[in-house]
Image (tube, coloured by chain):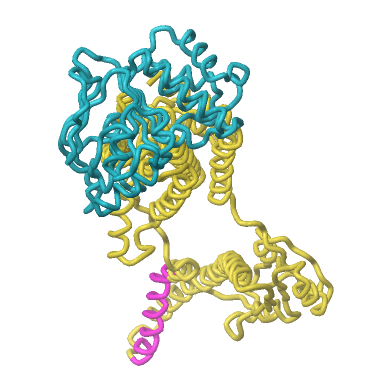
């Protein structure tokens, strides 16, 4: 096996393009996946026109003042703002593609907001571009509007809460420029109690006062609940998270596990399948099969070489990524175990593919055609497709090394809660199955 | 089935009742023959006759469904094998190929053997060239050299001179003749009837997997109802036609 390994290394050393591709391709894929999953979308640019007069930059609600800037800041927190001076300029920005959308706040926005309840305040959004961009901008704007609305609702709730306090305890209140001094329900209740006592035996008078006093007492006893109701309206549904198994893997570190699994798969499968198919393409298998190299040793050599190469590439890749994404170095022994198990499983799949092909190019094509869909299938979430289809996908994913490798690497890097031992046992089973398949394929070589 | 009347008492290689199917096709049927030490045996036959299949079974690459292949008692060395298409690594140099196969064949003195083979093939000055950069003829010379590395007692060659020019062919046959003179039994397949007549001690005809004839060129002429001065190729065609092939 030593001489065959040495020979394969000599061939690899002379195949600079192949080796370069085998390193560059997975790294490029890894980076693409990593960036796609760990970084947010690019900020969409929005043309912005505020027609609110300078004198109305603040909304007065009762005694509270709300700065309109707080609202717009919320809205533009995650978009690129292009200020325009009129509607035509906003339309032009959107039409020429400099802005993905235009957002116009009408002059009566503050008035409408101040009158709350009579008429909802509205803003105008202008869209352009293709369906995908439009959908992206619409969902971004809607989500930001919802955030801004929530912030505004919080302030309005605070104002309303202040009114309720004044109604309960008494105090001064401004409504539409008119000033009122309220005695409050508590004081009213006390006064009514005094009035009842002063009524003495006048049953008719007491009968008239009593329902009003009951109403005041009921109000005093329950008015605080109105504030609870207000806060419920502000945020009707609260989310409480329950994770059924293990720790939650952060998206960026899951992206690392995914990138490593994808790279490992490509290097192993392409290299192992190519190395074995090369023996057939060069017709050398007929020489080796005469007892010079036993079939199992030939397979083992290709598996070991491909697995070692992939292990080195992905281990270095992990170390490199750890400079940007915080990874726990004390878990490194688990990284090594997971990478080793996964490399061997992918390399065995590679030789099984290589045993079917007559030439390296066919083996590479077959490997790519098999590997890519498997990676995508393994990432389909439950609930993303119908239950029956998901069961089929689970079975297919379990029959190939990508899913268990991803589980093992994720568990090793992120302590995702998945059992690394179970994943490795799964990979061990697959190594036996694909090893047997490669052996059967090799017998067809002769 | 024809029998091998000319087999010597202690054959270097004996094939008995070899059979092989590919699906429904009976590629080799009940083939038996012996080859003596120093004998040069040519296997001829039309395309698809089963010549290469027979050679791969003799080489141990394919396992026959029935029958056995035996070397002379006490022989431990492997049968030498030179396939029709070059079976060497095009990304390795000439010397690296020879060295690798010499090590795999467990040759005693690897470097000495490699030097000797480079000299015999006349490729000393191309030793460090990649195989891929050599001409078809030179690649075939290396291909043959690899088959001879272990100095095998029996050498099998599948269409050995197909890719060679006349000068290289002459050199090859001179080399093979030297081997047979040293006692190596050589079996080769060919489509070139003239080449078989010129070099082989004995000719074996295979058609549709069946061994139809084993004998000298003159015996084939007789069997093909041709005169001693008639063209052997015509006698061969007449022989096959008379037997329904």
User: Which of the 4 image quadrants contains residue A72?
Assistant: bottom right
- Locate residue B92, reporting x and y percent: 54, 26
Q: Is residue B90 visible?
A: yes
Indicate the position of residue B224 as horizontal and vertical percent values. Answer: 29, 45
In cyan, which chain?
Answer: B
Q: Which chain is yellow?
A: A
Left or right: A181 in relation to A254: right
Q: Position of residue B78 (x, y in %)?
A: 30, 20
Residue A346 in the image: state x and y as whole percent: 38, 39
Q: How many marks?
A: 0
Choose between B210 and B68: the one closer to the eye: B210
Quick check: is A213 in the magenta stretch? yes
Quadrant placement of the N terminus of chain B: top left
Magenta stretch prevailing secondary structure: helix
Say which residue appears at 26% left-offset and 21% top-offset: B36
**Residue at the spot x=40%, y=25% of the render?**
A333
Q: Which residues are magenta?
A: A204-225
| A348 to A290, vertically: above or below | below
Decide whether residue A215 is among the magenta residues.
Answer: yes
Q: Nearer the viewer, residue A233 or A446?
A: A446
Tell me if A174 is positioned left or right of B144 in this view: right
Using the image, determine if residue B165 lies above or below residue B97.
Answer: below
Nearer to the camera, A190 or A120? A120
Q: Is residue A247 visible?
A: no
| Residue sitting at x 41%, y 68% | A225
User: Residue at the bottom extreme?
Assistant: A204
Asked if A149 appears above or below A391 in the picture, the reply is below
Which residue is drawn at the image coordinates 31% and 64% (left, top)?
A: A389
Q: Is residue B91 left or right of residue B50?
A: right
């Amino acid at each position: 096996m030593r001489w065959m390994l040495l020979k394969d290394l000599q061939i690899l050393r002379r195949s600079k393009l192949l080796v370069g591709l085998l390193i560059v391709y997975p790294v490029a894929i890894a980076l693409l996946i990593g960036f796609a999953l760990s970084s947010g979308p690019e900020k969409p640019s929005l043309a912005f026109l505020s027609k609110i007069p300078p004198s109305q930059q603040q909304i007065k609600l009762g005694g509270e003042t709300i700065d309109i800037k707080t609202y717009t800041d919320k809205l533009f927190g995650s978009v690129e703002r292009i200020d325009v001076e009129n509607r035509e300029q906003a339309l032009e920005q959107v039409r020429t593609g400099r802005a993905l959308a235009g957002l116009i706040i009408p002059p009566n926005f503050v008035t409408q907001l101040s009158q709350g309840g009579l008429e909802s305040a509205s803003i105008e959004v202008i869209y352009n571009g293709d369906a995908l961009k439009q959908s992206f901008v619409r969902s971004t704007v809607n989500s930001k509007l919802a955030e801004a609305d929530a912030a505004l609702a919080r302030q309005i709730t605070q104002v309303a809460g202040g009114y309720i306090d004044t109604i309960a305890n008494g105090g001064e209140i401004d409504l539409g420029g008119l000033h009122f001094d309220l005695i409050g329900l508590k004081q009213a209740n006390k006064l009514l109690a005094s009035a009842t006592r002063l009524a003495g035996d006048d049953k008719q008078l007491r009968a008239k006062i009593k329902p009003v006093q009951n109403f005041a007492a009921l109000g005093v006893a329950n008015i605080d609940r109105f504030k609870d109701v207000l806060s419920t309206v502000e945020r009707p549904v609260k989310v409480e998270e329950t994770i059924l198994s293990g720790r939650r893997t952060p998206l960026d570190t899951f992206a690392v596990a995914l990138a490593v699994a994808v790279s490992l798969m490509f290097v192993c499968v392409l290299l192992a399948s190519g190395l074995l198919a090369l023996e057939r393409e060069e017709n050398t298998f007929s020489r080796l099969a005469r007892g010079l190299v036993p079939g199992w040793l030939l397979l083992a050599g290709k598996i070991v070489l491909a697995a070692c190469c992939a292990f080195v590439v992905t281990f270095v890749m992990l170390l490199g990524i750890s400079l940007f994404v915080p990874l726990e170095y004390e878990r490194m022994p688990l990284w090594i175990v997971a990478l080793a198990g996964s490399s061997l499983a992918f390399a065995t799949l590679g030789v099984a593919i290589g045993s079917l092909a007559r030439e390296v190019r066919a083996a590479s094509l077959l490997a790519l055609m098999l590997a890519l869909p498997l990676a995508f299938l393994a990432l389909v979430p439950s609930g993303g497709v119908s239950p029956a289809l998901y069961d089929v996908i689970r079975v297919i994913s379990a029959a190939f090394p990508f899913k268990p490798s991803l589980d093992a690497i994720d568990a090793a890097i992120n302590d995702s809660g998945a059992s690394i031992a179970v994943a490795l046992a799964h990979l061990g089973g697959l190594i036996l199955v694909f090893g047997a398949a490669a052996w059967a394929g090799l017998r067809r070589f002769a | 089935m024809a029998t091998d009347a000319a087999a010597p008492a202690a054959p270097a290689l004996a094939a008995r009742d070899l059979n092989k199917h590919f699906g429904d096709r009976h590629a080799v049927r009940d083939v038996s023959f012996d080859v003596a030490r120093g004998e040069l045996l040519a296997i001829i036959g039309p395309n698809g006759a089963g010549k290469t299949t027979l050679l791969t079974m003799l080489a141990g690459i394919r396992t026959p469904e029935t029958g056995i292949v035996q070397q002379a008692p006490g022989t431990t060395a492997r049968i030498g094998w030179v396939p029709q298409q070059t079976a060497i690594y095009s990304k390795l140099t000439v010397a690296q190929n020879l060295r690798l196969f010499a090590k795999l064949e467990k040759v005693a003195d690897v470097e000495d053997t490699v030097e000797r083979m480079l000299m015999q093939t006349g490729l000393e000055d191309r030793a460090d060239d990649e195989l891929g950069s050599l001409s078809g003829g030179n690649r075939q010379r290396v291909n043959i050299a690899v088959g001879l590395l272990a100095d095998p007692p029996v050498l099998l060659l599948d269409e050995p001179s197909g890719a060679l020019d006349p000068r290289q062919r002459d050199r090859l046959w001179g080399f093979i003749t030297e081997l047979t003179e040293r006692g190596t039994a050589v079996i080769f397949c060919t489509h070139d009837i003239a080449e078989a007549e010129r070099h082989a001690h004995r000719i074996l005809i295979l058609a549709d997997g069946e061994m139809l004839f084993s004998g000298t060129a003159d015996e084939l002429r007789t069997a093909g109802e041709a005169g001693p001065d008639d063209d052997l190729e015509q006698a061969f065609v007449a022989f096959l036609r008379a037997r329904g092939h």
